[in-house]
């Protein structure tokens, strides 16, 4: 016969196990919860890429760079044919608006007559909060040899992309980036690191990747919000269809 103390222990264990199981059962048929907001997706077209959904903030509508600032005021990058192009030597450009957590869509294309190799072949970059670079580089089919965490879709010098679905020069590529901003301790170190999930041409290339710090030197800046910065690395790169959804 089991001693009473053991019996109590067994009964308590069964109670706790059952409680844990019940706690994990989702509540079904809750019609009183708020419904998710209805968002109309953007139209996808062969010529114009993915248009912004109804709740997005457009950062480039194909006409001007009024949402951006350059090194000395208005950006000097060229707007033409519904796109804009890096003007070498004029410096990076940044959005006037600043963001914390967001979903960003941005399309880029290298010219079909591209030249250069390594890090000088179509280099640009999308800096999240102005600090964390998602590399833009012409690395179609892994033919342009460079370090793996410096190729297209890399979180620069921290994480190479999981796969390489980049299209060839002359064709548009699309980044869809989901960014979770960092939080900070009182001493300005990370309480939670920034994180990135992203798709290139609809294919997952970063899966909730942890960012260690600024991608130039892993220094930590205690910024809660920041603009989206595009890099002038001395190479010709075209951009279009830039929009963001704050999360
Ligand atoms: Mg770059």
Image: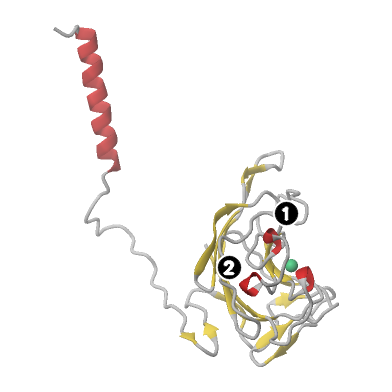
Q: Are marks 1 and 2 in contact (CB under 8 Å)?
A: no
Would residue 124 appear left or right of 54 to someone viewing this image? Answer: right
Mark 1 to mark 2: distance in Å? Answer: 24 Å
Would residue 234 appear left or right of 111 to someone viewing this image? Answer: right
Q: Residues within 10 Å of mark 2 (few under 14, many from 20)?
A: many
Tell me the tag on residue 214.
1
| The quadrant where residue 148 appears | bottom right
- Pick the front one: 124 or 189: 124
| The quadrant where residue 63 appears | bottom right
Residue at the extreme left of the image, as rendered: 1
Residue 139 position within the rendered picture, expressed as x and y whole percent measured from the top left: 67, 72
Q: Residue at x 29, y 39 (%)?
A: 23
83 versus 71 height, above or below: below
Which quarter of the rendered image does ligand 1 occupy? Answer: bottom right
Mark 1 vs 2, N-terminal side:
2
Would residue 119 appear left or right of 138 to someone viewing this image? Answer: right
- Pick the front one: 220 or 125: 125
Residue 227 position within the rendered picture, expressed as x and y whole percent measured from the top left: 69, 66
Q: How many marks?
A: 2
**Foreground: disc 1 or disc 2:** 2
Tell me the tag on residue 164.
2
Residue 56 visible in this rendered orientation of the protein:
yes
| The quadrant where residue 113 appears | bottom right
Residue 186 position within the rendered picture, expressed as x and y whole percent measured from the top left: 68, 39
Q: Residue at x 13, y 7 (%)?
A: 1
The secondary element bearing badge 1 is classed as loop
Q: Residues within 10 Å of mark 1 (few under 14, many from 20)?
A: many
Residue 196 position within the rendered picture, expressed as x and y whole percent measured from the top left: 58, 58
Tell me the tag on residue 188.
none
């Amino acid at each position: 016969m089991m001693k009473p103390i053991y019996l109590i222990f067994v009964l308590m264990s069964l109670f706790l196990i059952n409680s844990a199981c019940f706690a994990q059962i989702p509540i079904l048929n809750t019609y009183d919860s708020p419904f998710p907001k209805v968002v109309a997706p953007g139209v996808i077209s062969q010529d114009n890429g993915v248009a912004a959904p109804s709740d997005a903030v457009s950062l480039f509508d194909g006409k001007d760079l009024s949402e951006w600032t350059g090194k000395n005021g208005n950006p000097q990058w060229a707007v033409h044919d519904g796109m804009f192009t890096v003007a070498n030597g004029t410096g990076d450009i940044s959005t006037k608006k600043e963001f914390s957590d967001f979903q960003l869509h941005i399309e880029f294309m290298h010219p079909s007559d591209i030249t250069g190799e390594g890090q000088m072949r179509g280099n640009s970059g999308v800096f999240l909060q102005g600090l964390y670079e998602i590399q833009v580089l012409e690395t179609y089919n892994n033919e342009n040899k460079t370090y793996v965490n410096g190729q297209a879709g890399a979180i620069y010098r921290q994480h190479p992309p999981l796969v390489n679905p980049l299209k060839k020069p002359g064709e548009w590529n699309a980044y869809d980036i989901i960014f979770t901003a960092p939080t900070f301790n009182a001493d300005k170190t990370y309480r939670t690191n920034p994180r990135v999930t992203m798709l290139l041409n609809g294919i997952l290339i970063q899966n909730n990747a942890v960012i260690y710090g600024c991608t130039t030197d892993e220094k930590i800046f205690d910024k809660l919000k920041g603009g989206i910065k595009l890099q002038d690395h001395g190479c010709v790169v075209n951009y279009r269809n830039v929009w963001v959804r704050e999360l």
